[in-house]
Amino acid sequence: MDRGQRADLLRRAKEVRRDCEDREMDVWQTCARIREELPELSVLEAQRLAHGWSRVQAIARISDLYAQDGIENPRVTTGMLCKWEHGDVAPDAEHRRVLCRLYGATSDELGLRNHLRQSRAPSLPPLTSVVTVGNDESNDESENPMRLHRRTLIQAAGLAAVPLSQLRRLEGVLALPAESRQPETPAQVEQRLQSARRQFDAGALAALIAGLPPMLSAALTTAEHVDTPEGWARLASFYNLGTDALNKIGDKPPAHLAADWGVLYAKRSEDPLAMAASARAKGMMLRTGGHHDAATQVVERKVSSQMRQGACWSDR
């Protein structure tokens, strides 16, 4: 394919993405539509184009993700990404984990298990006729077809139930937290928190995500106003709920952002239970990106830190 043909493909992919945005389709639906219209593109390249990123922007986002977690940034260049997307070279195991974290997907969903030129548009993974049950409880869900199939169904149903406009509104508040006009009383914020938890427990994720932006704003304003450990801990709890809800429907990038805010505000509260809960949420997001060792370190460091400070866990 010459440069002119590739430029035409990219132009057409951009047109498809704009049409999908007008129709309020999510990224995975946009990716599938791009692949349907332009089967010459790999799933990996279609994912990037569905996000509206250039290769330079995609690499910058990788750097940001790793910088947020204090993890050494794996080397990725535009040339490497280009070869992976075109199917000239398959990424190694470490770089597969990087790409999975960037797009909030599994290797199978990105078509990285096989040579990229043979990858297909995103679809539900096939169920195998034989399932081996043993003592090896691997955390890699992409290795377990039954578990992956169930999780994909849940996430697809969750994303379909949440309007794109509501997701974007929540993502906007996560990117730039905004205070409400008037603070509420701590009791009112606690009541909101308990209501949000009941929604999560009941599986009412669409209602929870729709209500989180004003809840986060009210909790932030109140925490700033009263400036107590309880206020900051409550605010961290709202972000932890957002992390859990977004992760459950498969919207990984904003879930990572919510986890980061949760850790930040929990630390400000100096409440050991709040910090432990936020460390759990952060560890969960690291595990979904394949960083199991880092996830363990996040939790272990928080526990060790509180023990060194003499926090009495049994009395809390």
Image (cartoon, helix red, strand yellow):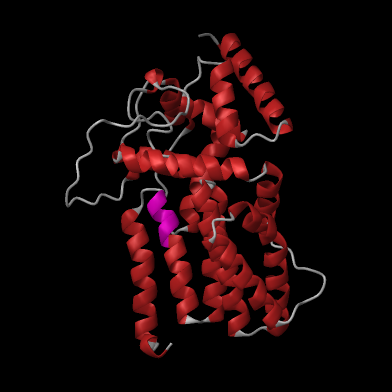
Q: Quadrant of residue 186?
A: bottom right
Front position in the image: 47 or 152: 152
Q: Residue at x 53, y 26 (%)?
A: 46
Q: Main secondary structure of the magenta part?
A: helix
Quarter of the image containing the C terminus? bottom left
Front position in the image: 140 or 263: 140
Front position in the image: 257 or 19: 19
Q: Is residue 160 visible?
A: yes
The reply to whether the magenta stretch includes residue 155 is: no
In the orientation shown, which residue stands out farthest toward the right? 181
Q: Residue at x 59, y 83 (%)?
A: 230
Residue 53, horizontal then vertical, whole percent: 60, 34
62 over 8 or under it: above or below: below
167 over 208 or under it: above or below: above
Q: Residue at x 54, y 54 (%)?
A: 255
- Left or right of 314? Residue 179 is right
Residue 242, horizontal then vertical, whole percent: 57, 59
Q: Quadrant of residue 101?
A: top left
The residue segment tinted magenta is 283-288
- Left or right of 114? Residue 85 is right
- Left or right of 176? Residue 135 is left
In the orientation shown, which residue stands out farthest toward the front? 202
Q: Is residue 64 visible?
A: no
Q: Residue at x 64, y 55 (%)?
A: 209
Q: Quadrant of residue 302?
A: bottom left
Residue 29, horizontal then vertical, whole percent: 58, 31
Front position in the image: 110 or 127: 127
220 over 312 or under it: above or below: above
